[in-house]
Image (cartoon, helix red, strand yellow):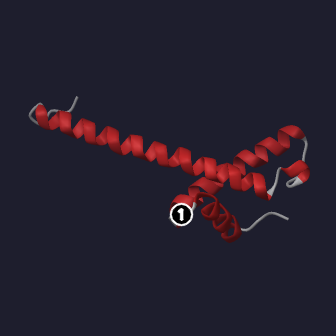
Amino acid sequence: MKTTTFNLKAAVEERIGAEICPAFFQKAEQYARRKLNFINERAGREYGEDGYGDEYLAILTEEAIGQLAFSEYTHIRSMEIMAARAAQEGGECV
């Protein structure tokens, strides 16, 4: 039986020791569930077979959160750098 979003969010928050914004978690969960389904399909497994179920989904979701957070950070940082350059160059965007 697949874990619910509520239970998965609680498990991941416990693993990382922090509360996760619901919208951000939803993106990570979608990515992790797609990845787990792909992994299981390629191996010819059902959800939960050979340990590739709830526990692995929590691991994949935690991993996705890290990836999404890093991506967001680099995007924001890039925008800050471009804005600073534009301000130095008199408002021209390069």
Which residue lies at the image location 64% right of the left edge and 54% below the top edge?
30
Number of marks in picture: 1
Taking the image as shown, residue 16 lies to the left or right of residue 42, namely left
Residues 57 and 45: in front is 57
Which residue lies at the image location 80% right of the left edge and 63% below the top edge?
2
Which residue carries the number 1 mark?
Answer: 18
Instruction: Quadrant for the N terminus, please.
Output: bottom right
Taking the image as shown, residue 48 lies to the left or right of residue 91, namely right
Residues 19 and 71: in front is 19
Which residue lies at the image location 22% right of the left edge and 40% below the top edge?
83
Question: Could you say where residue 25 lies in the image, as x and y percent from the top left?
Answer: 57, 60
Instruction: Quadrant for the C terminus, please.
Output: top left
Taking the image as shown, residue 91 lies to the left or right of residue 71, namely left
Rendered image quadrant of residue 54: bottom right
Up-down relation of residue 22 to residue 75 (above or below) = below
Task: Identify the residue at the far left of this view.
Answer: 90
Up-down relation of residue 53 to residue 8 (above or below) = above
Mark 1: amino acid: Ala
Question: Could you say where residue 74 lies in the image, as x and y percent from the top left?
Answer: 40, 40
